[in-house]
């Protein structure tokens, strides 16, 4: 009797994508600090050498995750607001929609900043880059830079409060406040 063994061999890009996809799911679900390399290896079904071939350190994997998360979030954000007349207020609707999809998990970037030690400068650069892009969006939509920053800060507050209370109420209330601020200018 002959026994044939069929091996499925992933190419390097497939392996890297699988590692990133697994890290993305785990970091988003349980946080960076609560996710170990061995868990990523096990759930991605890759060899330890494969993970370290693509990512020399957990920090390097985290940076790749943040790059991907920023790209995906920004694509969803832009798609959501693209056909809206009032893009600034639509951002709060985007948050409300995102809360439903993510079960009030909050912002990956805010979550990551709370569990990352200050010496991880490259990670903080990625976190700040994401938030700077969001602020730039508000500044492109609102000519008064102080008001743009206030709206940005209120949006960030809506994210945190929605996650903390697992409620849409903060987003709705802060959206109404922003509408009032914008209409009074």
Image (tube, rainbow, N blue to C red):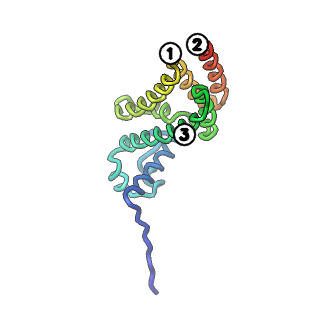
Position in image of residue 2 (x %, y %)? 44, 84
What secondary structure is marked by label 3?
helix
Q: Write the residue at 42% across / 70% down.
A: 7
Residue 168: in sight, yes or no? yes
Q: State the residue position of label 3.
A: 76
- Looking at the image, is mark 2 or mark 3 nearer the viewer? 2
Q: Distance from label 1 to label 3 (Cα)? A: 26 Å
Residue 70, image x, y percentages: 46, 38
Circles 1 and 3: CB atoms closer than 8 Å:
no
Give the residue at x 38% y 34%. 123
Disc 2 designates what residue? 185
Q: Is residue 30 visible?
A: no
Please give left or right for residue 72 compared with residue 60 in the image. Answer: right
Farthest residue, direction top: 184
Q: Residue at x 63, y 36 (%)?
A: 97
Q: Which of the pair 166/71 is nearer the observer?
A: 71
Do residues under tags 1 and 2 come within 8 Å of each other at their CB atoms?
yes
The quadrant in which residue 48 appears is: bottom left
The circle drawn on residue 144 is 1
- Given this view, does label 1 or label 3 mark the residue nearer the observer? 1
Say if 99 sits above or below 139 in the image.
Answer: below
Residue 94 lies left or right of residue 26; in this view the side is right
């Amino acid at each position: 009797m002959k026994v044939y063994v069929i091996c499925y061999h992933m190419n390097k890009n497939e392996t890297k994508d699988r590692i990133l996809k697994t890290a993305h799911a785990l970091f988003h679900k349980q946080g960076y600090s609560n996710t170990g390399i061995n868990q990523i290896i096990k759930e991605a079904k890759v060899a330890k050498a494969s993970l370290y071939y693509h990512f020399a350190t957990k920090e390097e994997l985290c940076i790749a995750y943040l790059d991907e998360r920023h790209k995906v979030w920004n694509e969803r954000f832009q798609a959501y607001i693209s056909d809206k007349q009032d893009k600034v207020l639509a951002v709060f609707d985007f948050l409300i929609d995102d809360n439903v999809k993510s079960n009030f998990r909050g912002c990956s970037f805010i979550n990551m900043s709370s569990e990352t030690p200050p010496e991880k400068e490259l990670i903080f650069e990625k976190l700040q880059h994401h938030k700077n892009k969001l602020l730039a969006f508000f500044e492109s939509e609102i000519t008064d830079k102080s008001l743009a920053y206030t709206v940005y800060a209120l949006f960030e507050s809506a994210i945190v409060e929605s996650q903390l209370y697992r409620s849409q109420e903060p987003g709705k209330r802060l959206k109404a406040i922003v509408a009032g601020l914008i209409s009074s200018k």
